[in-house]
Amino acid sequence: MVANLGPGLAAALASAAAMTAIVGLRYLVTSGFFAWLTGRVRPGLYQGLGPQIGAEIRWSLLSAAIYGVPAGIVAWGWRERGWTRIYTDVHDWPLWWLPASLFAYLFLHDTWFYWTHRALHRPRLFVLAHAVHHASRPPTAWAAMSFHPIEALTGAVVVPALVFLVPIHVAVLGLVLLIMTVMGITNHMGWEMFPRRLIHSRPGGWLITASHHHRHHEQYRCNYGLYFRFWDRLCGTDRGLLAP
């Protein structure tokens, strides 16, 4: 049936399906690893949360499709049609652009996340969509992608849109996705895995980790950022870290 759609559309749909499988598998492997690590480092932290974790996994696998479809279509368009501003030769742009593009993607993603996240806390949108994510009380390593489809869609469009606008080397793009995955999971684990000397340092004071994001899950109206505390501080929504 797919073959009857024409080679281009069939290939795009196959890429979307493959990317959905990759995102779903990545979620199961990475969240599974950090859940296992939690069991080793903080035994009993997730005790009694079996039903909640089951719901987190179900919502997350649905989100994997919502993230995977646009990413797969864009990946196909990049490979087959030359869409996007992804490049493979490091000399296509100055070498300084490699770290600069990493920061640009993280900052732009963080900006989008902060403002859409605040919007999702408006009462109607919260009840309609964001309540699914906040049903994780406390959040676990399985909660990073536990979103209602509406919320998942707001997150799924960011990086696919940015690759059409901001040049990025394919390896740096991979690093962006790695950081997005690791921080999304570790921010929800319910315990701080990064050393105190980093968290309480001057540079660490601008980063979001579990100590910062867990307070959002407790108080709701604060700490909206994803990677950085820039927008929270600028907008007066930063409530600091959980007590050690």
Image: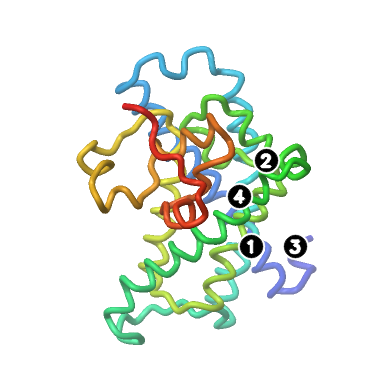
Residue 228 image label:
none
Instruction: Tell me which label, 2 or 3, sits earlier in the chain.
Output: 3
Q: Which residue is mark 2?
A: 130
| Residue located at (52% from left, 51% from top) | 22
Image quarter (top left, top right, bottom left or bottom right) of the C terminus: top left
Q: CA distance from mark 4 to mark 3?
A: 37 Å
In the image, which is nearer the foreground, mark 1 or mark 4? 4
Element at label 3: loop
Q: CA distance from mark 1 to mark 4?
A: 21 Å
Kindly check if marks 4 and 3 are in contact, taking CB atoms under 8 A apart as contact.
no
The reply, left or right, for residue 102 in relation to residue 139 is left
Instruction: Tell me which label, 1 or 3, sits earlier in the chain.
Output: 3
The residue nearer to you, when weighing 9 against 189, is: 189
Instruction: Tell me which label, 4 or 3, sits earlier in the chain.
Output: 3
In the image, which is nearer the foreground, mark 1 or mark 3? 1
* Spot occupied by residue 209 in the image (x, y as percentages of width and height): 38, 42
- Mark 1 burial class by Cα count in 10 Å: few <14, some 14-19, many 20+: many
* Spot occupied by residue 112 in the image (x, y as percentages of width and height): 57, 60
Q: Which residue is mark 1?
A: 70
Instruction: Tell me which label, 4 or 2, sits earlier in the chain.
Output: 4
Tell me the amino acid under the disc marked 3. Answer: Val
- Mark 4 burial class by Cα count in 10 Å: few <14, some 14-19, many 20+: many
Q: Which residue is mark 4?
A: 117
The reply, left or right, for residue 159 in relation to residue 13 is left
Q: Which residue is mark 3?
A: 2
Q: CA distance from mark 2 to mark 1?
A: 21 Å
